[in-house]
Image (spheres, rainbow, N blue to C red):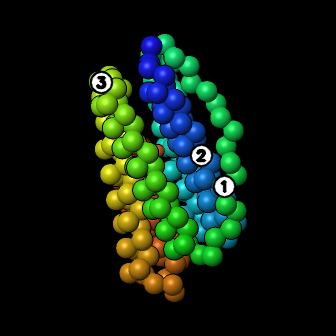
Amino acid sequence: MLKKKVEEICNRQVEREGYSSNLYLAMASWAEANGFNGVADWLYAQSDEERMHMLKFIKYINERGSMAIMPAFKKPPVEYKNVEELFREVLKHEEFVTASINEIVALTHAEKDFNTHNFVQWFVNEQIEEETNARLILDKLRLVGKNNLYQFDRDIMSLRIPAAGTQTA
Ligand SMILES: [Fe+2]
Ligand SMILES: [Fe+2]
């Protein structure tokens, strides 16, 4: 069984990955409703990935003889000023998730829980890719400028870096 503190921080991550999934769904909905179908596709795919991350934590907690708890999720924001602001929020959110993954690494080290320490390494790598993805998109947005969003929206799916350990593009 997981130590109480480790179980708690893993359940906290269930909530954070689940919220990430909902956040990107809400962003996808905003993008779709505003005519950015490529951006919406990118965000729907991102939302699916985040659900997969949540499931990884749920299954890990349960496999170790503890129990994953489904939390209530807070409501994600509904409105964005523009696509650039949306992606700045994506990057900010991913930096927050990276920090929370790092806290899990630190705790498992302190608690000498090397199984969980090993498990969470996948997420350490994943977060590098998530942040790179978001920065790449922000760089591209700066390049195309405000007037060429049509092309950006058309091409955004080709910018996706596949998530660690998955075949999805
Ligand atoms: Fe995630
Ligand atoms: Fe993420």
Q: Nearer the viewer, mark 3 or mark 2?
A: 3
User: Where residue 116 sits: x, y (%)?
Assistant: 36, 26
Q: In the figure, 25 relative to 142: above or below? A: above
Mark toward the start of the polypeptide (1 vs 3): 1
Identify residue for label 1. 76
For the residues labelled 1 and 3, the Cα–Cα distance comes to 35 Å
**Tag 1 near tag 2, CB within 8 Å:** yes
Does residue 160 show up? no
Q: Give the CA distance from mark 1 to mark 2.
A: 8 Å
Q: Earlier in the sequence, mark 1 or mark 2?
A: 2
Report the quarter where the N terminus lies.
top left
- Of 138 and 155, nearer the camera is 138
The three-letter amino acid code for the residue at tag 1 is: Pro
N-terminal-most mark, 3 or 2: 2
User: Where, by quadrant of the figure, is residue 2 drawn?
Assistant: top left
Category of crowding for the residue at label 1, using alpha-carbon neighbours closer than 10 angstroms: few (below 14), some (14–19), many (at least 20) = some
Residue that label 2 marks: 19
> In this rendering, which labeled residue sits more in front, label 1 or label 3?
3
**Does the rendering let one see residue 7?**
yes
**Mark 2 Cα within 10 Å, few/some/many (few <14, many 20+)?**
many
Image location of residue 73, percent across then percent down: 67, 43
Q: Secondary structure at mark 1?
A: loop
Q: Secondary structure at mark 3?
A: loop
Looking at the picture, how far across and down is residue 107, in whole percent?
A: 37, 34
Q: Residue at x 70, y 62 (%)?
A: 78
Which residue lies under the disc numbered 3? 112
